């Protein structure tokens, strides 16, 4: 179907046909919702929609296999095949993941302003395939006429292309899929996101189990061939439904407007304070960009982006949580390499431990949503706010690092008393004979519980706070915060090693090349304390800065609370915050 821009009349007709719900009072609202849900279950899904949903879900599933199959054993491959140290390999992993999550805000801007979502994803997929092929070629088992430095450079370029490609897909595929269902009932959009999340986790589960096992116990050649093929299939399946997609002409992005207004606010606030008038009436940092306060922008344009001021402080505090979260694929992986991987006659892939987090999240989501939250509401008489949920997750993240530190204390003691040689993907490690790798399960379970409370709620917070024209930017900013968490992990471990290094003492760094001679336990306890400090700041800000966490939306608003003019206009009623930032 060719690209077109739906008219306002068409949109109104489609919306009226799909929704068909009138708000005439509290009881009528409940009855309409019940009737709508019943009709939704009986409504036949058009063949075109089925094809679109299947293709998009498969694309996300295969892309997840491709991305996480590299992340699963990136440190191991860099250690054993390319000669990187633990610090260098961990830094490379941080940058790879961080770039993949940081670029969506840029690719979202490109999609909204120039190429459109389909073209951006298709181009990103082609770049993705090029990067996967380069990574795969580095793993070829026979000798290549390249030096080790050349192979390293080739591998890094491949990772860079993969990160660019995944950035082009991550920011667009879920909103693109949801937009294809806008002509249907909202229940189908909700179901799409549920299956989308399931597809993502299923792909990562396969990556950290089957693919990781092949990489560690068979060959990286086959271990990297699988994600390469998966990505080729992802792009092929996605493009095969080209004629079924509803495509839209790019309408432009507010990202440029956000940058310009933010820059103007900084200039007026810090450089041109003499131009500020009516200073007492300024309620937000962005108000400095308004004409009446010395800036050059109309109030309407500034007010459009003011919701960003509410989410930015929260996203900044999410960064450290993500830094702790990414320890799973870096320092926890390094720790697992030197623990006993043997389970009877079966040798467990170290990367398979990350599946404990995935499984924990999939288990905890229904428990938390259908047991913990209702129990909280019953006990305290009100729902658990978004801020309380995010703060709870931060506490669990800190406890996860404490658990990792306790495991490391015992591992270090045992590995010197009862060492056993262990070969993982061709690399030889002195492991702890009596400390099984399953001892890491508690730390993975705790971080999974933290993710259930914090990560999912943070995404919900970003989506709920954003007006329609800012939803893409808000999502991109959240993914940027996730990426910054990975970058921060690289920075923190570099700083810690720099401070702990003593040139007169061999292996004095907390995270040396051989962690059996270091103090990874100190590093874990440091991150646990740092995370609790971050939690204290989070509580302080959300308690004293935010007047209302704006997360309590009435499930069943009383009829008298709904303004009559909104009832007549069939307008949805939501809670409104009153924070000034």
Image (cartoon, rainbow, N blue to C red):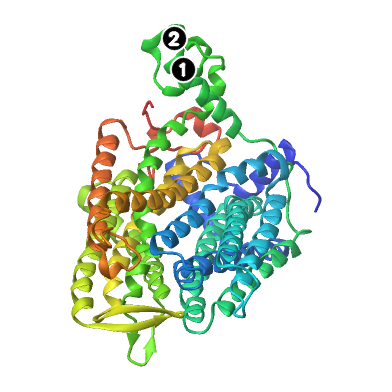
Quarter of the image with the C terminus in it: top left
Residue 13's place in the image compared with 54, above or below, is: above
For mark 1, what is the residue?
288
Q: Position of residue 304 (x, y in %)?
A: 53, 28
Q: Quadrant of residue 362?
A: bottom left
Q: Residue at x 47, y 84 (%)?
A: 217
What crowding class fits label 1: few (fewer than 14 Cα within 10 Å), some (14-19), or many (20 or more)?
Answer: many
Furthest-right residue in view? 2
What crowding class fits label 2: few (fewer than 14 Cα within 10 Å), some (14-19), or many (20 or more)?
Answer: some
Q: Position of residue 198 (x, y in %)?
A: 50, 66
Depth order, front residue of 85/186: 85
3D distance between C-alphas at marks 1 and 2: 7 Å
Q: Is residue 510 left or right of residue 219?
A: left
Q: Is residue 390 left or right of residue 416?
A: right
Furthest-bottom residue in view? 345
Depth order, front residue of 468/479: 479
Q: Quadrant of residue 403?
A: bottom left
Q: Which mark is residue 395?
A: none
Q: Residue at x 55, y 64 (%)?
A: 67
Q: Position of residue 226 (x, y in %)?
A: 60, 75
For mark 2, what is the residue?
276
Q: Is residue 10 left or right of residue 548?
A: right
Depth order, front residue of 276/475: 276
* CB-based contact (under 8 Å), mark 1 and mark 2: yes
């Amino acid at each position: 179907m060719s690209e077109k821009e739906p008219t306002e009349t068409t949109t109104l007709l489609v919306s009226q046909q799909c929704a068909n719900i009138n708000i005439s009072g509290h009881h009528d609202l409940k009855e309409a919702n019940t009737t709508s849900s019943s009709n939704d279950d009986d409504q036949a899904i058009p063949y075109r929609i089925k094809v679109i949903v299947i293709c998009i879900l498969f694309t996300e599933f295969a892309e997840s296999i491709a991305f996480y199959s590299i992340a699963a054993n990136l440190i191991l491959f860099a250690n054993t095949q390319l000669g990187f140290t633990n610090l260098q390999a961990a830094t490379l992993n941080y940058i790879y993941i961080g770039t993949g999550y940081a670029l969506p805000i840029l690719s979202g801007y490109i999609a909204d302003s120039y190429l459109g979502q389909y073209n951006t994803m298709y181009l990103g997929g082609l770049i993705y395939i090029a990067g996967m092929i380069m990574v795969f070629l580095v793993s070829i088992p026979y000798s290549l006429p390249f030096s080790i430095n050349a192979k390293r450079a080739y591998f890094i370029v491949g990772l860079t292309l993969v990160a660019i490609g995944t950035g082009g897909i991550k920011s667009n595929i879920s909103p693109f899929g949801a937009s294809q269902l806008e002509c249907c009932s909202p229940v189908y959009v909700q179901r799409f996101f549920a299956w989308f999340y399931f597809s993502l986790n299923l792909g990562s589960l396969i990556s950290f189990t089957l693919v990781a096992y092949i990489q560690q116990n068979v060959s990286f050649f086959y271990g990297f061939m699988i994600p390469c093929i998966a990505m080729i299939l992802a792009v092929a399946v996605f493009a095969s439904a080209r004629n079924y997609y509803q495509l839209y002409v790019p309408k432009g992005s507010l990202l440029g407007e956000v940058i310009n207004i933010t820059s103007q606010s900084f200039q007026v606030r810090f450089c041109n304070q003499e131009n500020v008038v009516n200073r007492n009436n300024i309620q937000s940092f962005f108000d400095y960009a308004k004409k009446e306060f010395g800036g050059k922008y109309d109030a309407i344009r500034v007010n459009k982006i003011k919701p960003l001021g509410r989410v930015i402080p929260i996203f900044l505090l999410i960064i450290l949580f993500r830094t702790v979260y990414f320890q799973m694929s870096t320092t926890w992986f390094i720790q697992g390499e030197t623990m006993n991987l043997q389970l009877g006659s079966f040798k467990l892939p170290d990367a398979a431990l990350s599946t404990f987090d995935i499984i924990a999240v999939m288990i905890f989501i229904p428990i938390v949503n259908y047991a913990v939250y209702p129990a909280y509401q019953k006990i305290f008489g009100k729902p658990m706010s978004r801020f309380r949920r995010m703060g709870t997750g931060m506490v669990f993240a800190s406890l996860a690092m404490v658990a990792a530190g306790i495991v490391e204390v015992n591992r270090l003691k045992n590995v010197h008393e009862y060492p056993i040689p262990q070969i993982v993907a061709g690399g030889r490690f002195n492991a702890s004979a009596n400390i099984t790798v399953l001892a890491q399960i508690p730390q993975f379970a705790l971080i999974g519980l933290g993710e259930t409370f914090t990560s999912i709620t943070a995404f919900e917070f970003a989506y709920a706070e954003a007006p329609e024209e800012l939803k893409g930017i808000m999502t991109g900013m959240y993914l940027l915060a996730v990426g910054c968490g990975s970058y921060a992990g690289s920075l923190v471990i570099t700083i810690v090693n720099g401070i702990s290094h003593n040139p007169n003492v061999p292996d004095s760094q907390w995270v040396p090349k051989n962690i059996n001679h270091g103090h990874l336990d100190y590093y874990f306890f440091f991150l646990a304390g740092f995370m609790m400090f971050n939690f204290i700041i989070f509580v302080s800000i959300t308690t004293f800065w935010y007047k209302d966490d704006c997360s309590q939306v009435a499930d069943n608003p009383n009829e008298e609370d709904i303004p009559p003019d909104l009832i007549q206009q069939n307008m949805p009623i939501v809670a409104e915050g009153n924070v000034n930032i």
